[in-house]
Image: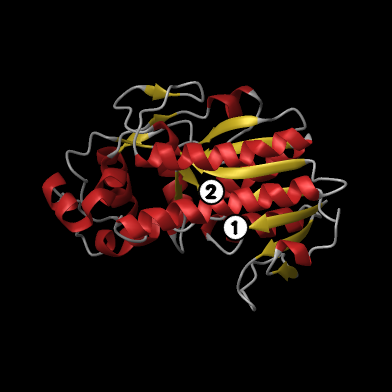
Amino acid sequence: MRILITGGTGFIGQALCPLLAGQGHQLVLLSRQQKPRLPRGVTDHVQKLDALERDSVQAVINLAGAGIADQRWTPERKQELVDSRVNTTRQLVDWMKEQSLPPKVLISASAVGYYGEQGDAEITEATPPIPGFTHDLCRAWEQEALQAEAAGIRVCLVRTGVVLDQGGGSLGRMLLPFRLGLGGRLGNGQHWFPWIHRQDIAAIYAWLLKQDEARGAYNASAPQPVTNEAFTRALGKALHRPTLFPMPEKMLRLLFGELAELLLVSDRMLPQRLLQEGYRFQYPELNQALRAILR
């Protein structure tokens, strides 16, 4: 299968592209850069959609989007977060609709932020969302992707938790202070932390490609979510370091402004549909995942 991938140079794409290439797929990366650093398994890239030969792609994976936690949420940054997701997805879907033989499937990223603050409630794909910036962002992002259904394209939305692995993401930012013995819980530590190993999130995209009946939203997080306090203890244990330096909520809000909401939100997300439909997690349990990552 020839697959067009947007956002393929990012943290998830770097794991997904070699996996898909190893399964025999031909990958084309869409990147605005003239000479992007291509992930393993990618040999072809285009800067614009109209550079692609018509009807040459059978599937599209949409990972594009500016890093949600990379900068403080100024009004300008929030608009960039919206534009890099919503506008990019709209352009992608418009291009798909123009094809005489459109791609059969669009698998488009979304995020746990769709649900907003949910406290201790277990979150399935049917859980009503709580309004807020992250929900509004994810809803608009998903709605653009779903427009592809009008062209008969199967659409899957991957509501992703916090992706863990070496080399980037949230864990990459945490490792140095934790290794120095300066790690600790955030706030009171009782908010739920919906994590997933990077190998699992890559495998979920590859699995959804093959499931002809799969469509709609899927929660992509490990089946055993933990609180921030439990995650902090587990990471300290895996690194053989104490975790004695909590970060009070007031300090988080002072340092990060509105972005602190992302660090303190509680989402006890469960991958109900993935489990019901037969996906088997490689890393369902946190200690197992951390051992694999840090070995």
Give the numbered dot on residue 233. none
Residue 184 at x, y percent in the picture = 20, 50
**N-terminal-most mark, 2 or 1:** 1
Q: Where is residue 162 in the image (x, y as percent from the top left)?
A: 43, 46
Residue 283 makes an appearance in the image: no
Q: Viewer-proximal residue, 279 or 291? A: 279
Query: According to the image, label 1 marks what residue?
Result: 13
Q: Which residue is drawn at 61% across and 44% down?
A: 108
Q: Residue at x 72, y 61 (%)?
A: 49
Answer left or right for 281 relative to 60: left
Quadrant where the image shows the C terminus: bottom left
Query: Which residue is found at the position 46% from the left and 60% from the top?
Result: 166
Near-viewer residue (267 or 129): 129
Residue 111 at x, y = what percent? 47, 41
The amino acid on which the numbered mark 1 sits, given as a three-letter code, is Gly
Relative placement, left or right, of 228 versus 205 is: left
Residue 139 in view (yes/no): yes
Name the element at disc 2. Answer: helix
Label 2, label 1: how many angstroms apart (C-alpha)? 19 Å
The residue at which mark 2 appears reads as 86
Residue at coordinates 32% horizontally, 58% vertically from top-left?
A: 174
Tell me which amino acid carries mark 2.
Answer: Val
Q: Is residue 90 left or right of residue 285?
A: right
Mark 2 residue crowding within 10 angstroms, few (<14) / some (14–19) / many (20+): many
Q: Tally the marks.
A: 2
